[in-house]
Image: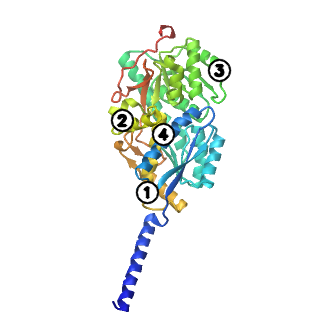
Amino acid sequence: MSQSRNLALAAIVVLVIVIVAAVAFLRGGGGEVSEIKIGVILPLSGRLAETGADLRRGIEFAVDEINSQGGVKACGGAKLTVVYGDSAGKPETGAAEAERLISQEGVIALVGAYQSSVTKTASEVAERYQVPFINPDSTSPALTERGYKWFFRVTPHDEMFAAQQADFIDWLNQKYGLNLRTFAIIHEDTEWGSKVAEAWKKYFTQHGYTLVEEVSYHAATVTSLDSEVQKLKAANPDILLAASYIQDAILLVQTMKAQNFAPKVVLAQDAGFINPSYVSQVGKDGWYIFSREVFSPDLIDKIPRLKEVNDRYKKKYGVDLNGNSARDYTGIWVLYYALEDACKKASPSNPEEFRRALRDSLVNLQLSPDQIIMPWKGVKFDEKGQNILGQGLIVQMFEDGKYHVVYPEDFAVREPVVPFPPWSQRG
């Protein structure tokens, strides 16, 4: 082979290497990564530690599944690594943890933070740093009314739920002739509970129901609900609407029983009422209480993939998925799908560029029902960052100690027990 031919071949090899490198760079492969670090903020200590543990199981299960299936393939199989921040249930601590995860840990995105009041402050930090914030589980309507560009809420919010709950009460009246006319509200007084109460008043009033009492309390310090339940009982509502976290939900049910307060319908706004610890602690006193939900094992026969996922989850943790763990599991998968798209446009080795690509991917993301385990029509964010394809369920606890779906009818597996039986007629 002549020297000139060798030089020509060498030049071709060099050119090919340069082209491959350039293509890889333009596709975002300019810096290979073995992991993509995400920050998760949850109440891992304090009064909501049990709920935080429940949410964490959903996060960990999703991450384990994604990593075992090859990681983020468009980023060369990079594995997801979670760095946790403990809010302790406090907004100021949640904000400090968001600051730490972004500035010290260098996370690509944040996920969290359950309580709307904590999500509010933590996402303020993310917005300032221009870091995508995925919120799987906070339902204050105000969170997506702030004009933020980096905040994406996967779950439906409380205005959507309140509208559905008013429809549910209409349905009870029409189908069972309950003649429900008046309602009372009890709620914890932070961002979440206060906004839930506003949404209930808006939609129940629109449907023609009359508010006869509203009481609030501070969940972080409350040790007695005696005076609050006395006020509610004196008002004699047909319907009691309750927005409580776990310890106060248990306290409310115990106090209602102690004071023999039994309105025709008790309808809770998820949160503490669907926590496994609540269910085990209230026992049969929780029977016949309704709750808003976003998930139920009853959906196993109605949603593709759910039975398989729930079986694996139960084998690992010994409990079924619930509204908390299922939503946070779903939140991580939503982030995963967006990461797959973002990795085609940028590399996590350039965090600022990659975060912008990830935000754009979330803006344009559209998931079909068969890509998630929730009873939703899919996932698609509007201009405010709200998933507009979500919807809720109404469940009721039955004598087997489990919640079952009673509404809407296309997901229902049981007829509701109405009205709420007097305490004296229970075993």
In three-dimensional space, the C-alpha distance between marks 4 and 1, rounded to whole angstroms, equals: 22 Å
Residue 224 is labelled as: 3
Residue linked to disc 2: 307
The answer to whether any part of residue 269 appears in the image is no
Near mark 2 (Cα within 10 A), the count class, few <14, some 14-19 or many ≥20, is: some
Return the residue at label 1.
77
Whether tag 4 and tag 2 are in contact, CB under 8 A, the answer is no
In-image side of 105 versus 295 (left or right): right
- In whole angstroms, how far apart are the C-alphas of marks 3 and 2? 41 Å
Q: Quadrant of residue 344?
A: bottom left
Question: Most extreme residue toward the front, as rendered?
Answer: 1
Instruction: Tell me the residue that label 4 is attached to.
Output: 58
Q: Position of residue 319 (x, y in %)?
A: 46, 31
Look at discs 3 and 4 and give the one toward the viewer.
4
N-terminal of the pair, mark 3 or mark 4, is 4
Q: Amino acid at mark 2?
A: Lys
Distance in Å between CA atoms under marks 3 and 4: 32 Å
Query: In the image as oriented, which residue stretches furthest toward the top?
Result: 424
Q: Residue visible at 53% across and 20% down?
A: 282
Instruction: Name the spot of residue 188 as percent of width and height, x first.
Output: 60, 28
Residue appearing at x 48%, y 22% in the figure: 209
Q: Quadrant of the N terminus?
A: bottom left
Q: CA distance from mark 3 to mark 1?
A: 52 Å
Amino acid marked by disc 4: Gly
Q: Are marks 2 and 1 in contact (CB under 8 Å)?
A: no
Provide the secondary structure element on which disc 4 rests: helix
> In the rendered picture of this protein, how many numbered marks are placed on residues?
4
| Most foreground residue, 107 or 138 | 107
